[in-house]
Amino acid sequence: MQYEGVLRKMETEWDQPIRYYLLFPGDFVRMNDLLDRQVGLRFLKYECLSCGLDRPIYRQGFCRSCFFETPQAGEWIMHPEKSKAHLDQEDRDLAYEKKVQLQPHIVYLANSSNVKVGVTRKSQVPTRWIDQGAHEAIEIVETPNRYLAGITEVALKEHVSDKTNWRKMLTNNLEDVDLFAWRNDLKPHIPEEALPYFIDSTQETQLEFPVLRYPEKVKSLNLEKTPEFTGRLMGIKGQYLIFEDHTVFNVRGSEGYYVALEIA
């Protein structure tokens, strides 16, 4: 069985374990059903997620020119504290920026490889935690816009990491921690403007991923260097496919690649 299309991050559905879907034109693949089966990936061309042209992907699924022009790749995406829609100031497309930035945002703690602080739209909970491969997470602050969430993250990352060690996350070399205690310890460091939005009543969310066996060490599959790959799928965590030979493939990191997916 074969499917063709441009890669976008896998869609997810809450369950224990998480359910994963890879979307193709007019069809989709239930990735959980492929566990312990031979799966092949073949790189065919590029397809920029903005212009749709066969141009080398620069970042985030966009070709170089689109990355510096499309509002979906504005600097405030990676740096929420640089959001300006609440000031009625345009970056690239004010209408789009208002739509995304002027909605409830969550500042959270997640434990994927270590405890980290992050920001996401409220509508993206728990999707954001799933994409990061977090096995536990907790909300700290719910703000009315992206800017307030961004300055809160900046303040808190002086005291806790804002990065995930993806190799550690994929080998599952993890420890459970008391995120509720972490949350309370960080409360004094929340900026005054965001403190009224502190969530008094919250609890940890536990996540389980569909993995038959974790790798001891990981080797990353790069489709530009290895255009064809076949292996037995042993698990899915975050946005990674984990294969029997310890190869891992970052689906989200390969957005904009047009591929053939072959299932034995």
Image (spheres, grey):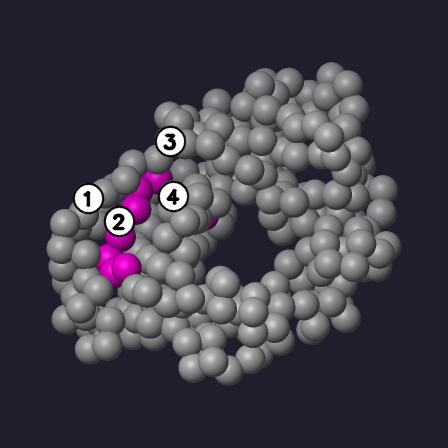
Residue under pointer 2: 138
Residue 180: say if magenta: no
Q: How far apart are marks 2 and 4 (CA)?
A: 10 Å
Earlier sequence position, callout 1 versus callout 3: 1
Give the residue at x 76% y 63%: 63
Q: Distance between the residues labelled 4 and 1?
A: 13 Å
Rendered image quadrant of residue 144: bottom left
Question: Residue 163 in the image: x percent, y percent?
Answer: 42, 60
Left or right side of 83 for 144:
left
Residue under pointer 1: 203
Earlier sequence position, callout 4 versus callout 1: 4
Earlier sequence position, callout 2 versus callout 3: 2
In this view of the protein, can residue 80 be seen by the observer?
A: yes
Q: Which of labels 3 and 4 is toward the front? A: 4
Q: How far apart are marks 3 and 4 (CA)?
A: 12 Å
Question: Residue 153 in the image: x percent, y percent?
Answer: 34, 68
The tag on residue 126 is 4
Q: How far apart are marks 2 and 1 (CA)?
A: 6 Å
Whether pointer 2 and pointer 1 mark residues with C-beta atoms closer than 8 Å, the reply is yes
Residue under pointer 3: 208
